[in-house]
Amino acid sequence: MNQETSVVAQISLLAIQLGVIIFAARFCGKAAQRFKIPPVLGELLAGIIIGPYLLGRVNLGIFGFPHGLFPLPEGGSIPVSTSLYSIATLGSIILLFMSGLETDLRLLFRYSVAGTVVGIGGVIFSYAFGAGLCMLAMDVPFMHPQSMFLGILCTATSVGITARILSEKKSMDSPEGTTILAAAVIDDVLGIICLAVVLGLLSAGGSEVGSVDWGQIGRISIKSVGIWLGATAIGLVFAHQIAHFLKRFRPAATYSIMAFGLALLVAGFFEQAGLAMIVGAYVMGLSLSKTDIAFALQRSLHGLYDFLVPVFFVVMGMLVDIRVLADFNVLKFGLIYSVLAILAKIIGCGLPAYFMNFNLLGATRIGVGMVPRGEVALIIAGIGATTMMTVDGVSVPVIDASLFGITIIMTLLTTLAAPPLLAYVLSIPGRGVKKEVDDVSLVYTKFVLPSEFVRDFILRALIDNLRMDGFRHSEVDRDGGIIHFRKESTTFSLHVTGNELEFESNINEVMLLKAAMYETFVELNKNLTDLKMTRPIGMDEAMAHSAEGQVEVKAKAPINISRIVAPDCILSDLKAQNTTDAIKELVQALAWAGRLADPELCLQDVLAREAVVSTSFSDGVALPHARTTGVNELVAAIGISREGCPQASGDDPKNRIFVLSLCPKQAEEPYLQFVAHVARILSDEKNVEKIVASKNAAEIHRLFSAKTTK
């Protein structure tokens, strides 16, 4: 009974600890983002604060926690409980599994030569600088486990942080951007192989510090590289068969969990073979990245990723003994290590790039882009903190408390320094290559559409058609405007820019893309022809102004009309002679009031919306509206036509009241609520009569601000 109670107590403690970690991770992660700092650093800081070396060991007076929420376990090799560290390890596995899934193999192969050379240069210089510093500062051999781990830690690259800056600067598809991404993958792969070799040496009896057995190192290296390459080759060859098997277990949520199960199996087998679990997880993700279920896996596992990965980073922060950071020698070592880590990437990656058709500016951009260490370094440091070596017959961790603190300093400084440095060198005008080189293996097929509204209309229909044909697609990248499509071995990308749709594909897919666009146009033309002959169901009834039988509407808090409609955007006497000119006049009024970022684009989008189906309703009311990138907030203009403006059909009553509303595409604004509010106001015949009769903008503004009651 006591044992059962103890188990229940441990589980309840773990549940409470996870709850605290989740809230701390989210709070500190959001706070870091507010200051333009990667959230991973906020999560790391959260772990340091609530960890066992700071607040975690303090008795806060909470019943059942006399030694704090995160007490130091007795006799443990790590400062957190085994169960909590196990959950954190799952976070590192899904992190590397998702990284493998997100790897663009086509991009990797396209820039494999430059990326490989740059990646190898970065690994060689970084490893030499890191291991060399450890050898000199700690007076240990170059092949000592601690030297090797500091060297491997220095090779890591956080491609996620770099990719974010490249995306913000619209440089993701530039020669420098693609080379950085490809080199980062090669860089991490080589670093993981080095990690596998070191772990293989330690697991094979090399944990006893002493003379170096180069024969054993060679055998372990061949074994580690062989297992990694063999598993990767098998995974890539049988990737489509694996995906086909998984798709039998629909829906996507089910086979996504099974795919993660495969990642756990492969990770476990790699650990048993003497390699790191993260290597196996990355191999599994890389194998499935070329299949058509990769995008579904990313979407379905996103929730699990958001839960486990922050837990991992917070637990990594808990491993930091805050006391060692007060040691001047640790701080000095950490600063020197950080400077060398930055220089190693700039020199090691920039120098080879300079001889690979990049000029000095391009080479500098590539070198700086490879600087941030971030999550990969933390994963390797966590492995080092739990990997034991034997010194004078005593088993000690390879990465002790002091070295872990040094690693944290290096990770923090390189991750904080890289974004502003990269943003600066990317902002310097000029191309980064010595000579432009076109990729003859790719073909670009562009379609220019009348407006962004029509583009979005076509895009939604096109995605539906391709999905019905068996294609899977990635989420729309709001920053870069790129959608990746995949069906078995057929892949292509769609770049969405302005009112243009541009496909990037091999020559073999061009006819497929043209056929898809043609069928989409034909289908939409037919549907729009039918749609123009109909009315939105219920709108005419809602806008009918019979004195009797009106539907009673409950009182609602009025929309903030003052924010949406400025007084100088209410025109009590429109000069327009038709509906189109009335819309133009209202757009011009908004432009004169400084409410529009791009008046011409706004006009194009609202007229395109009208071309799809008219927003003119019974009894002379028109509610033209559109979502557009031409505004930064929800804005509206109201116009009254004394003579009335004829509609395009010529049969309906002339429009007397116009309410034009424009809403930004990507902002959360009460767009539909505003349109519905206006419709409710105009459903009252008395309001319509007052609005038409009024020549006072303030009176019209007051009528539209009233509560919709009946």
Image (spheres, rainbow, N blue to C red):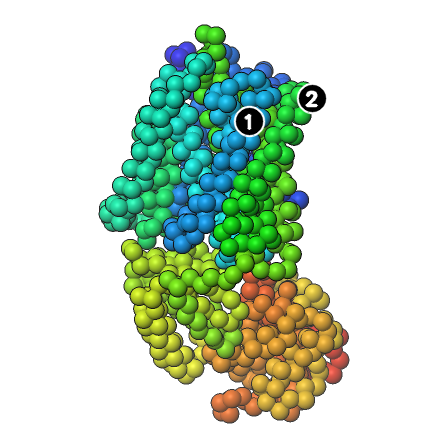
- State the image coordinates of residue 681 (x, y, percent, origin top left): 61, 73
Q: At which x and y percent is residue 595?
A: 69, 70
> Which quadrant would the C terminus be assigned to in this image?
bottom right
Residue nearest the viewer, comparing 526 with 574: 526
**Number of the label disc, if any, that sits on residue 211:** none
- In the shown orientation, is residue 584 left or right of residue 189? right
Residue tagged 2? 328
To which residue does mark 1 refer?
A: 132
Q: Amino acid at mark 2?
A: Phe
Could you tell me which residue is drawn at 32 percent across and 71 percent down? 511
Q: Does residue 657 appear in the picture of this structure?
A: no
In front: mark 1 or mark 2? 1
**Of 236 and 564, which appears nearest the observer?**
236
Q: Is residue 181 visible?
A: yes
Residue 557 sits in which quadrant? Answer: bottom right
Q: Which amino acid type corresponds to the residue marked 1 in the rendered image?
A: Gly
| Label 1 to label 2: alpha-carbon separation | 21 Å
Residue 479, how many percent across, how many down? 54, 57
**Local secondary structure at mark 1:** helix
376 up-or-down from 612: above or below? above
> Residue 706: image x %, image y %?
67, 68
Depth check, front residue: 122 or 314: 122
Sequence order check, earlier mark of 1 and 2: 1
Q: Residue at x 26, y 49 (%)?
A: 240
- Within 10 Å of the Cα at label 2, are there few (<14), some (14-19), or many (20+) other Cα atoms? few
Position of 52 relative to 18 (above/below): above
Q: Quadrant of the N terminus?
A: top left
The part of the image, by quadrant, that contains residue 559 is bottom right
